[in-house]
Amino acid sequence: MPTPMPPEVIAPADVVAYVLAALAIILIAARAVGTVFEKIGQPRVVGEIIAGILIGPTILGGALAKAPLPGVPGVAGSGLVNDLFPLQAFSFLNLIGQVALVFYMFLVGVELDQRFLRGRGRQMLIVAIAVTAVPLGLGFLCGALLDGATWRPDGISSTAFSLFMGAGLSVTAFPVMARILQEKQMLGTSLGAVGVGSAAIVTVIMFLIIAAASASAKGSGAVSGAGTKLLLVLGLSVVLAVVVRPVLHYLTRGWEEDGPLPGNLLAGLLIGALATGLATDRILGAALVGGFLFGMVVPARPGLAEAIIARMTDAVILFFLPVFLAVSGLRTDLTLINGTVLVGSALFVTLMIVGKLVVGYLAGRAVGLDSKEAGTLGALLNCRGLLILVVALIGLQLGVITPQTQVVFVIGAIVTTMMTGPLVDLFLPKDVRKATLATTALSVEDLADGRRVESGTARIAR
C-alpha cells in the first residue's frame, strides 16, 4: 500500500483569503437552500444542513485533507472540494463552528423559561431515560446485524462498535430541535420546555455512552470512565447553581428592563459561556452542553433575556450557526452509497424511529401528556440533526466505524430531521399551537402590561 501524502501547507496570508472565500460560499448556500426548504414547508435549518452537504465532496468531488493525529499521519486532500477548503482553512472554519454551537446553545438556555421546568423534573428524567435506554439496547441489535467488514473495522470489538451504534440511535439533535421549536414559536411553551429539558439530559447521557465506547475501544474500563465523567458534569452543575448563579444575580442587580444591555455585562456572559463550554468539552467532548448550562443560570430578570437575544441573534443565527452546519456537511460523502449501504440505512432508520418516535410517544403518555402532546414530544425527540454526525466523526477518528457506517448515520440524520417539522404540524396544527401560546407561553406575553412580544431568535429563525 502506498504511503499517504501529507496535507498541503499553504501560506498564512493565503489562509485568510481561503477562509473569507469559504465563508461567502457557505452563507450563500445556506441562505439559498434554506429559503427553498422554507418554501416547501421544511424548517430552514434542514435546508442549511443539506447546503453543507451540497458544497462538499458529494457534489464537488474529491476529498478533504485529514489532519495528522497521534500515531496517525495526515492525508492530503484531492479534487475541487480540497481546492476550495484546504486543511488549514477548514480547520479554522471548524473552530468557528464549535464556537457557534456554544453561543447558540447559550441563547437557547437563556430563552428557555425555567418556570416551565419547575415541577417537571420527574417527567423529563423518565422520558430521557426511556428514549436513551431503549435505543442503546437497539444499538446492540444493530451491531449484531451489521457485523461485516463494511460496517465494523478489523480489530474493533463488537462491544465498542455496538456502543457507538447505540449512541447514534440515542441521539436527539439538541440544537436543531431547539431551532425547530423556535421556528414553530413553541420554545416558550410547557411542551417545548419539557422537550428541550429531556433533550438536554439525553445529550449528556449520549456523550457518556460515547465515553464508554471510547474506553472500550481503547481497552480500558467503559463503566468507570463514563461514571467519572457523569460525576464531573454533576459537580459542574452544582457549581453553576450554587456559586455562579448568585454572582450573576449580583452583577445584574442594576438591570433596568427597558434600558440598554451594558457591553461589560454581555462580555461577561459570553466569557462565562465559553468557560463553561471549555469545561464540558474537557469532560464530555461536547462544548455545546456547557453553553446551554450557563445560559440556564442567567437570572430571569424582566427583559434581560430579550435584550441578550436581540444583541446576539443576528450574528449567531445568520452567520455562526450556518458555518457549523456547513462544516459538518462538508465532511460527508454520499457517493459511498450503494445497495448494501441502503439496506443498512433502512435498518438503522427503522430502529431510530422505533427507539425515539415510538418510545417517546409511549413515555410521554406515561408521564401524563395527552396523545397529541406525546406524539409531538416523540417527533421532537426523533430529530437527529447533526449531533449524530458528531458521533460518527468521533467514531471515525477512533477507528471504531467505517466511512460506510458514517454515511448511514448521515442518511438517518436527514430522514429523521426532515420528518420532525411535518410531524409536529400533524400532531399540533398551527391553530392548536396558537391556542397553546395564548395560554402558556409566558415568554411571548408581557404579563405586566399585556403587550405582545416575540423572541429575537424565533423572529430571525423564521
Image (cartoon, grey):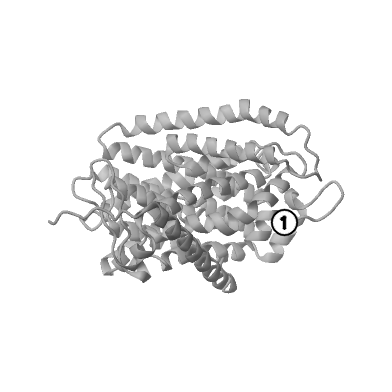
x and y percentages locating residue 51 in the rendered image: 47, 66
The N terminus: image quadrant: bottom left
452 relative position to 133: left or right: right
Q: Residue furthest left?
A: 1
Q: Nearer the viewer, residue 390 or 379?
A: 390
Q: Residue at x 37, y 42 (%)?
A: 210
- Left or right relative to 75: residue 236: right
Count of marks overlaid on the render: 1
Could you say which is closer to the camera, residue 94 or residue 46? Answer: 94
Report x, y in % for residue 130. 48, 45
Dot 1 amino acid type: Thr
- From the top left corner, tell me how far across and down residue 426 is, in percent: 60, 66
| Residue 45, image x, y percentages | 54, 62
Establish if 37 lies above or below 300: below
Q: Nearer the viewer, residue 400 or 260?
A: 260
Residue highlighted by disc 1 = 436
Q: Quadrant of the C terminus?
A: bottom right
Q: Residues within 10 Å of mark 1 (few under 14, many from 20)?
A: some
User: In what element is the residue under mark 1?
Assistant: helix
Compared to residue 164, the image places residue 212 above or below, namely above
Quadrant in the picture for residue 113 = top right
Q: Nearer the viewer, residue 86 or 140?
A: 86
Q: Evaluate whether residue 212 shows in this view.
A: yes
The residue sitting at the right extreme is 449
Q: Is residue 189 visible?
A: no
Does residue 30 lie above or below 104 as drawn?
Answer: below
Could you tell me which residue is drawn at 37 percent across and 61 percent down? 332
